[in-house]
Image: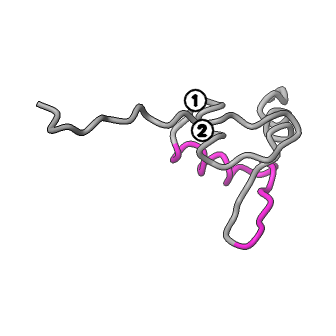
Amino acid sequence: MTHGLKRRPPRPFNLPTPGAHATSAQCCVKYQVSRTTWWRWNQVPGFPQPLRLGRLVRWDVEAVDAFLTLPRA
């Protein structure tokens, strides 16, 4: 029984366009990781620092891609 209410489909996350800065939620979807993993990655030395504008926090997706594709010893 729906009681006349329609359920909305879940809102899809828009992945950032190349050259754009992404939110942590967008990055988690793009890299298929949990929020906990994303914040742990941020603690790794050399991980790209976010751009902070007041309360807004965004990451350069291209810089994150470059960091994640670096060969590790």
Dot 2 falls on a residue whose secondary structure is helix
Residue at numbered disc 1:
32
Residue sitting at 79 percent across and 56 percent down? 49
Check disc 2: other Cα within 10 Å, few if <14, some if 14-19, many if 20+.
some
Q: Is residue 35 left or right of residue 17?
A: left
* Viewer-proximal residue among 9 and 41: 9
- Magenta region: 35-54
Q: Identify which residue, 18 or 8, lies in the foreground.
A: 8
Identify the residue at the far left of this view: 1
Residue type indicated by callout 2: Cys
Residue under the image location 38 percent in, 36 percent down: 8
Percent from the top left, x then y, of residue 19?
Answer: 88, 39
Image quadrant for the N terminus?
top left
Q: Residue at x 66, y 40 (%)?
A: 27
Q: Nearer the viewer, residue 28 or 68?
A: 28
Please give left or right for residue 59 compared with residue 40 in the image: right
- Amino acid type shown at disc 1: Gln
Residue 45 among those drawn in magenta: yes
Query: What secondary structure is marked by label 1?
Result: loop
Mark 2–mark 1 CB contact (< 8 Å): yes
Label placed on residue 28: 2
Quadrant that contains the C terminus:
top right
